[in-house]
Amino acid sequence: MSHPKAAAEFLKDQANSQWHDETLWMIRDKRDTSSKSIPEWEKLRNLASDIKDNVLSNLDQYLEQFESQALKNGIKVHWAKDAKEHNEIVLRILQEKNCEAIVKSKSILTEECHLNPYLEKHGIEVVDTDLGERIVQFLHQPPSHIVMPAIHLKKRDISALFHEKLQTEKGNEDPTYLTNAARLHLREKFLGAKVAITGVNFGIAETGEFLVCTNEGNADMGVHLADTHIACMGIEKIIPRRKDLGVFLRLLARSATGQPITNYSSHFRSPAEGKEIHLVLVDNGRTRQLAREKFKNSLKCIRCGACMNTCPIYRRSGGFSYGSTVPGPIGSILSPGLDMKKYSTLPFASTLCGSCSDVCPVKINIHEQLYEWRQEITKHHGAVGKGLSMKLASGIFKSPLAYQFSGSLMRKVIKSLPKIVIYNPLNSWGKSRNLPEVPKESFQEWYKRNRHE
Amino acid sequence: MSSREEILNSIRGIQKENKALPDIPNFQLEGDLVELFKNAIEANKGEILSKKEFENWISSNNFQHIISCSEPFHTYATQELPDDAHQLDHLELAILEVQFGVAENGAMWLDDSQLPHRALPFITEHLVLILSKENLVSNMHQAYDRIGADHSGFGLFIAGPSKTADIEQSLVIGAHGPKSLRVILV
Amino acid sequence: MKKEPHIGLFIPCYVDQFYPQVAIATLELLEKLGCKVSYPLGQTCCGQPLANAGYERDTEGSSLHFIKLFEEFDYIVAPSGSCVLHVKEHFPNLPGKEMSAISIQKKIFELTEFLTDVLKVGNLKGAFPKKVGYHSSCHGLRGLRLASSSELNIPHFNKAKQLLTNLDGLEWIELSRSDECCGFGGTFAITEEALSVQMGKDRLADHLSHEVEVLTGGDLSCLMHLQGIASREGQKVEFMHVAEILNQAIR
């Protein structure tokens, strides 16, 4: 489904979409308050951006340094060029360990690689342990937000779901009660799992350690009880020095939810005695994105989700309207790099308002990249975005605003567009909006009469 | 060619302008560190206790399973540390020392030297952390200065009890880990 | 200013066609403030709708035309942040005309920033005894930085507010969401009709709930969208461009 269609669908339930908008705005508001309590906030953003620039310009060296340090620390390092290889590596480790059930904490990368269905196909039970992720997993849905996976659901939905899956009381919608039911259910899974999978927030080249940040403590519950920890990490998650964490940890949670820091920030450097840590470094399109000069700094993203919370589109259309693993503004500049055809409407699901770029803790120029993707997508007019560019073009020309193009420009454009587009009589401006009253004369005419000799 | 080589080679093949790694200035935090730390812990839904308040709290609870990794608090322990962390499942209270605390956000640092089991601060139902007032730093930059090049296999900042807001953004304390966090400032 | 600078008045196409009164107000206002202003005839669309729709490469003709019309002026002033931003940032590559483009981009100003930053207008004398709600257009706000955006931790400023609050009786209304997008977004208004309208309704409701009498702004595209919704809903709020308020008040 195209973004406009999905958005219109989402907006049909007015009460729900309004709640979604207001709730995410509240989080944006908390982020504002929190960031404004730090006088050096803008300096931190600049530093984070500069550090990430340095990373991207030396990524090969940092990856090698990271790997050699990690190996010294006793971590087993694997490299995966794509999602397929990533999934195969994970499965191989599980098979070596004769492991049939795993617990997994939040990892957008494993979502991107579609690890869960792959493992399930091979007979492995995967339990997502983040509460929001467990909820959407029960529903066979992907997360609709990278930080708040179940933000599209209301407590009555979750109550009904838990009644079915966890035998909670029918109609009991109390979040504390429901959370406790999940706690008991997941505790059993934690105690039973031999292997735990996590994502990675930061990998430190200098030390070979990596960080996992959570509020629930689910990542730690999983890995410290399991014998084997598999950490899946996109290659862009590298930062050079341990002290760079001072910058990133000050920005991450404040940007994400307004908290000063996540309740748990775990630094994994070596496995505990008798245990194993496997680290899977994944490319899956990242080196291709790095080669795109205009889009490479989308790889600076630290997955805080602030751009989603602030985006007036995301708030009113929901995460699923994007149809991509990472929704919202950052997703709309990452996804076309993975599949331009499939995600061709996403860069247009924006007013280019620029709020995303201003909240971004690593200063990704998201809205400028949305603009640039539009230029790319329309170049592939026929092959990629036929339906799309026709729709857009018709948007311009069927608009009653009578944009007064210069003759030559108009002719140039008209030549490249099918007639049906230009003469399409439908008009979506007027469905809910009146047109301005047409004045007796244009300014040009007035000027000629009044000022021009 | 291995995937490792393939990935590294494709990065090497990209023309990149070298961008310098910036120095991180010595940002400071204005104010009394103890006050700031207290406020931060409370905002994170933790609690600050005096030794006396701790004693009252513990005597009003009838905990059967307490482990202490802090010498001065050993008298409260009801059991020794098991060999296997799975046996900690019914643990009601863990008392641990931390190395230092961060005033700006309430985060406290522990590493393997405080954690005989890495699972300990997560699996316990309630957690009490012991922090010396002398060991407060102002912000995360000073925190990492303090950690320096320490080589521990595992290090951890804890800033509050386990929490979630995944159901309609309603805050619930005690998602998977501790249902409460208390800090005794000594 | 030493030598009397010559200002070229850039009137965006839709303002020319639908809002001549705003163009007139801009011209009169600048003249009242002692500027020598000319409106070069034959202005066309600056190319923004095409560029934002992904066809920047097809705006070469309109860009060259723009340069030709405005090259000789000392300043170019327009009552639209959005169109000014387009000229400043989104002209396509113009082989052989790069320097001209840069020169244009350096001397083009949105009206309020021209008044505060170039003319350095201090206290405007006039009265406008109404409750005024200001809609920050995103391109003006985060593109031209005509005000501090709510996301940033920087000292608060707002160039339009700086001018308007000079006026006697004018009550500047603070909104619940000070600078959220109205949902116009050019072709977005058509291609994402449902979202666009919802965003507009929400923005309008913020103003109405604060009992705004006059809803103003620096970009008529946003105001046209909001006014379109208000008029369809039968809301009484009045819409005026900042230039109209200033020109009317300091008559």
Image (tube, rainbow, N blue to C red):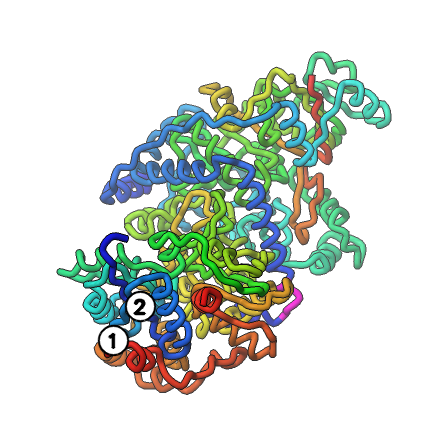
Q: Which residues are magenta?
A: A13-18
Question: Hey, what amino acid is under mark 2?
Answer: Phe
Q: Is residue A188 visible?
A: no
- Specify the principal SS of the magenta part: helix
On screen, A424 above or below A183? Answer: below
Looking at the image, which residue is at 48% across and 38% down?
Answer: A41
On screen, A302 above or below B28? Answer: below
Q: Which element carries disc 1, helix, strand or loop?
A: loop
Horizontal arrangement in the rendering, residue C87 relative to residue A302 (left or right):
left
Q: Which labelled disc corresponds to residue C41?
A: 1
Residue C166, position as x, y percentages in the image: 50, 56
Lower position in the chain sequence, tag 1 or tag 2: 2
Q: Camera-side residue: C127 or A402?
A: C127
Residue A448, position as x, y percentages in the image: 28, 80
Q: Is residue C107 visible?
A: yes
Q: Chain of mark 1?
A: C
Horizontal arrangement in the rendering, residue A385 relative to residue B174 (left or right):
left
Residue lying farthest top? Answer: B72
Q: Camera-side residue: C123 or A414?
A: C123
Residue A304, position as x, y percentages in the image: 51, 45
Number of other residues with Cα within 10 Å of mark 2, as a class: few under 14, some 14 to 19, many 20 or more: many
Q: CA distance from mark 1 to mark 2?
A: 10 Å
On screen, A408 above or below B160? Answer: below
Q: Which element carries disc 2, helix, strand or loop?
A: loop
Q: Camera-side residue: A61 or C213?
A: C213
Q: Which labelled disc corresponds to residue C10?
A: 2
Number of other residues with Cα within 10 Å of mark 1, as a class: few under 14, some 14 to 19, many 20 or more: some
Residue A16 part of the magenta-drawn span? yes
Q: Camera-side residue: A61 or A353?
A: A353
